[in-house]
Image (spheres, rainbow, N blue to C red):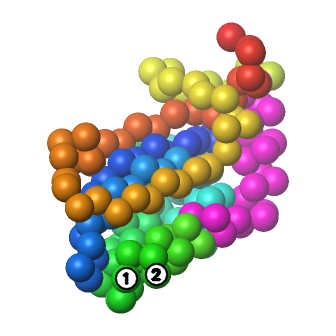
Amino acid sequence: MTTYPLFMNHRLPLAGNGFWAAISLRARVLLREESASEIYVYGVNPGGICGTGTNRDAAMAAFWKRFLSVMLDVAEEAKSFEEFKAEIESALNETNEEYEMLWNEAVQNVRDGKVNLTGVICQQADLGHSIKIEESSKPIPALNPSEEVVLAGPKRGAA
């Protein structure tokens, strides 16, 4: 079983009740390969969300689909932008402490050279998760969805 500490970076616009939200987020996730065709993605931040698939891409897509579903439900129920923002920030800031310990171990394995994902950019693990939500009255192309998955590893200043 191999475990990878990843950041899932996403940017997307979401419509709510009377508002547009521009969201940029970096989620911390653990990708665990239980077998060649049994892959899980567990949320560290956001905790409580999991995706599964028969390959890495399918598992990551399942995770993102579940998290997006949470955000869409909140957008539908929130009565204001402020309520939406608070709920989404709370969801992303929720930490699964068990997976956080495993994530930290996996980061150390990357730093020690024991684990690598060929073709995946490696980013400083100490950046942590983040979210930025702004109300947008004038949608522009820069708000269009984007996605990037990176391996968490090197310390600041390390090559």
Q: Quadrant of residue 156?
A: top right
Which residue position is annotated with label 1?
80
Crowdedness near tag 1: few (<14), some (14–19) or many (≥20) residues, C-alpha within 10 Å: few
Q: Is residue 107 magenta?
A: yes
Around disc 2, counting alpha carbons within 10 Å, would you say few (fewer than 14), some (14 to 19), or many (20 or more)?
A: few
Q: Which residue bears the numbered disc 2?
A: 83
Type of amino acid under label 1: Ser
Q: Residue at x 67, y 38 (%)?
A: 127
Query: Which quarter of the picture shows residue 106?
Result: top right
Q: Magenta part of the protein: which range? A: 92-111
Locate the C terminus by quadrant. Answer: top right
Residue 105 falls inside the magenta stretch: yes
One can see residue 57 in this view: yes
The answer to whether residue 38 is seen in the rendering is no
Give the main secondary structure of the magenta stretch. Answer: helix
> CB of mark 1 within 8 Å of CB of mark 2?
yes
Label 2 secondary element:
helix
Residue 157: percent from left, percent from top: 74, 15
Taking the spot 19% from the left edge, 54% from the top edge, the residue there is: 139
Query: Viewer-proximal residue, 101 or 83?
Result: 83
Residue found at x 40% / y 58%: 134
Say what amino acid the circle numbered 2 marks: Glu
